[in-house]
Image (cartoon, rainbow, N blue to C red):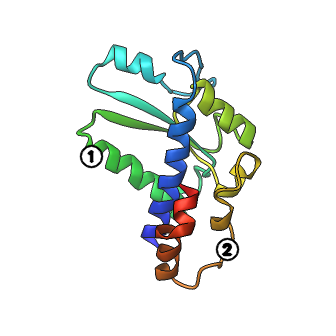
Amino acid sequence: MKRIIAIALTICMMLAIFAGCSSGSGNNATAPAGSTAVPAQNAAADNAETIVIRVNSAIKSSTVEETANGLGILQFVDKVRERTDGKYEIKLFMDSQLGGSSEQVVGGLQSGAFEMCTLALGSFGEYTNAFMPMNFPYMFSSEEVIHKVVDGEVGQRMR
């Protein structure tokens, strides 16, 4: 189960990075009222040691510690801090604070309003069908089958 979560998070992060890289060089986004977000470029200028990466997440803050996705994103935050010795800080915006629809999320990534997101793979169906094979519950009979698919020809086509 951990490998499945890791694969899903990795795919979402790769999409977020690619979408963020395709935006212009400016970061004119503003944080929502009441948030403590620091724009990544400003954070880097204010403190050369810490780079803040804003993550828009549809995961509910009230149940984040009760779901596999929630636990996965919390572990991701901790691992990034740990493995980069605090050079990178992940700032989570739970409950879709920075955008909830697919259009808002992709637009936010492209404009630089935030750098990453946790969006269900099926939500990207409006933009590409590359991830649709992974959006069927109970499609795979075991972890071994999932790894054969993801590491095989289907996974190669998705990449």
Estimate the x, y position of residue 159 in percent, counting from the top left.
53, 54
Q: Please rate how many residues cluster around mark 1, counting C-alpha atoms within 10 Å: few if below 14, some from 14 to 19, many from 20.
A: few
Q: How many labels sit on residues?
A: 2
| Residue extending furthest toward the bottom | 141
- Pointer 1: what residue? 82
Say left or right for 138 vs 156. Answer: right
Q: Nearer the viewer, residue 8 or 38?
A: 8
User: Is residue 67 visible from the viewing direction of this image?
Assistant: no
Instruction: Decide: is 155 above or below 128.
Output: below
Q: CA distance from mark 2 to mark 1?
A: 33 Å
Instruction: Decide: is 114 above or below 94.
Output: above
Estimate the x, y position of residue 153 in percent, counting from the top left.
53, 68
Estimate the x, y position of residue 65 in percent, counting from the top left.
50, 59
Q: Please rate how many residues cluster around mark 2, counting C-alpha atoms within 10 Å: few if below 14, some from 14 to 19, many from 20.
A: few
Residue at 40 percent across and 51 percent down: it is 76
Q: Residue 137 got which mark?
A: 2
Residue at 59 percent across and 53 percent down: it is 62
Judged by depth in the image, the label closer to the viewer, 2 or 1, is 2
Amino acid type, callout 1: Glu
Residue at 33 percent across and 50 percent down: it is 79
Q: Nearer the viewer, residue 153 or 39?
A: 153
As helix, strand or loop, the secondary structure at mark 1 comes to helix
Residue at 51 percent across and 30 percent down: it is 21
User: Is residue 61 visible from the viewing direction of this image?
Assistant: yes
Estimate the x, y position of residue 93 in percent, counting from the top left.
56, 38
**Disc nearer the start of the sequence (2/1):** 1
Marks 2 & 1, CB-CB < 8 Å contact: no
Amino acid type, callout 2: Pro
